[in-house]
Amino acid sequence: MGHFRLLVVGNGISAYGSYLNMVALNVFVYHVSGSALVAGLFMAVRLVTNVLAGFVAGRLVSRHDRKRLMVGADLTQAGALLLLLLSPGAGRVPLLFALAVVTGACSTLSQVALRSSVPEIVGPGLRTRANGLLVTGRSLAMIAGFASSGVVVAGLGYGYAFALDAATFLVSATVLLLLPIRTRAVAEPDAPATEEGSAAEWGVRLLLRTAPLLAVMIAVRAVDGLGSSSHNVALPLYSDSLDPGHPATFVSQFWATWALGNIVAQQLCGRFMTKGRRSPGERAFAVGSCVMSAGFILVFCGLPTVPAIAAALVAGAADGFTEIVYVTRLQAAPDAQRGRLFGLSASAENTGFGLGMIVSAALLDHFAPLPVVSVFHGCAIALCLVLLAVLFRRGSALARREGDGGAREAAAGRDLPTAEGHSA
């Protein structure tokens, strides 16, 4: 795990650059163009690129060296930012849209490649702990990036902010280059080959034949994206209604507590889901998603400060737990299929989040935050309850089949073998 911890540090640094970059670039586009429409188009281009890049990234990760892909993505983002710094003012608007495409595609590619590589870097038995470390690193990077973006831009200017962004990607690429890690499984003669076909065809095969429960989990993550977008859009409005004189107070308290909950979840997952124990699966994912969505809804219920912050803590912990369980479950797939799974997942999550941003922003012009957040997160809860019902029925049917088999074995006068091969 020593090499992986260094990778987590490098990934956290690049994630900090990504979040800082997200805020600084959005503000800079409006500053350069003077148009809210252009700023909105910039964010739309980046989001659409994230969605489309998921399908392409899945195939690239399945076919090529993942370490090289991650290094190339970091270096490409650093180069694009440096090019922006050197460009004249008149040509910056077209370059900014090109940068939106580059950063959207490269960030998705890096995420898909890294998640697909974790079982090969640390081993299957430690992937839950490794995913917990990654979740913690990215949570801290998000808080630091969002919190420092205003200070960096206001105090140093856009040029220094973009230079800092580029430096974080260079650091991440250097760490990856120096680490002696293997990111792909050793090819075996009987290993399943990567399935051919378009991303849509592969997704249909997954849904109908290969792993329908995994397809449902990916659908839940897409609906979770809807819920996440709703509370992200609603938080500033809700915070302003609580204290118009200090509208940022509740937002900062919420995100700090949410990050703390994520860290707590990582520590608990690392302690109780250790090597040699069975990793939690679909049931834990569904229950965690329900708790997470319920916690986010409670935050907007007008509770006093302490209960509201407690709800944010629970939501953050459930969010972190669900993320770890979900990623760990997808990583149980064969290496040849893993890249396509994470590519499909990235596209689904980004689609849900982007669609939710548009719809929730429109609804919040007419409705209070609570009903909007409740409807969006309520959809996630409803889908998780359906998943739990399916899992319960499958478990009951399996138990009945095993019971019938046991009765027939006993009637035939034979003992049942255990997993070790001895008689029961």
Image: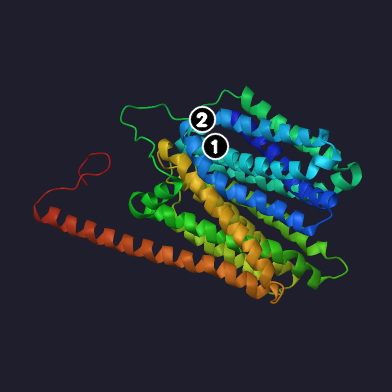
Above or below: residue 16 compared with residue 391? above
Whichever of labels 2 and 1 marks the residue nearer the N terminus, that label is 1
Q: Position of residue 282 (x, y in %)?
A: 43, 55
Q: Camera-side residue: 44 or 162?
A: 44
Q: Quadrant of residue 351?
A: bottom right
Q: Residue furthest right?
A: 155
Quadrant in the rendering for residue 212: bottom left
When the figure is inspected, residue 61 is found, relative to residue 48, above or below; the finding is: above
The count of marks equals 2
Image quarter of the N terminus: top right
| Mark 2: secondary structure | loop
Residue 68 left/right relative to 74 = left
Are the residues tagged 2 and 1 within 8 Å (C-beta)? yes
- Residue 1 appears anywhere in the view: no
* Residue 70 in the image, given as x and y percentages of width and height: 60, 33
Q: Residue at x 76, y 54 (%)?
A: 39
How far from the left and from the top, in percent, is residue 299? 68, 68
Residue at image coords 64%, 31%: 6
- The dot on residue 183 is 2
Q: Residues within 10 Å of mark 1 (few under 14, many from 20)?
A: many
Residue beneath disc 1: 113
Tell me the colour scheme of the image.
rainbow
Amino acid at dot 2: Thr
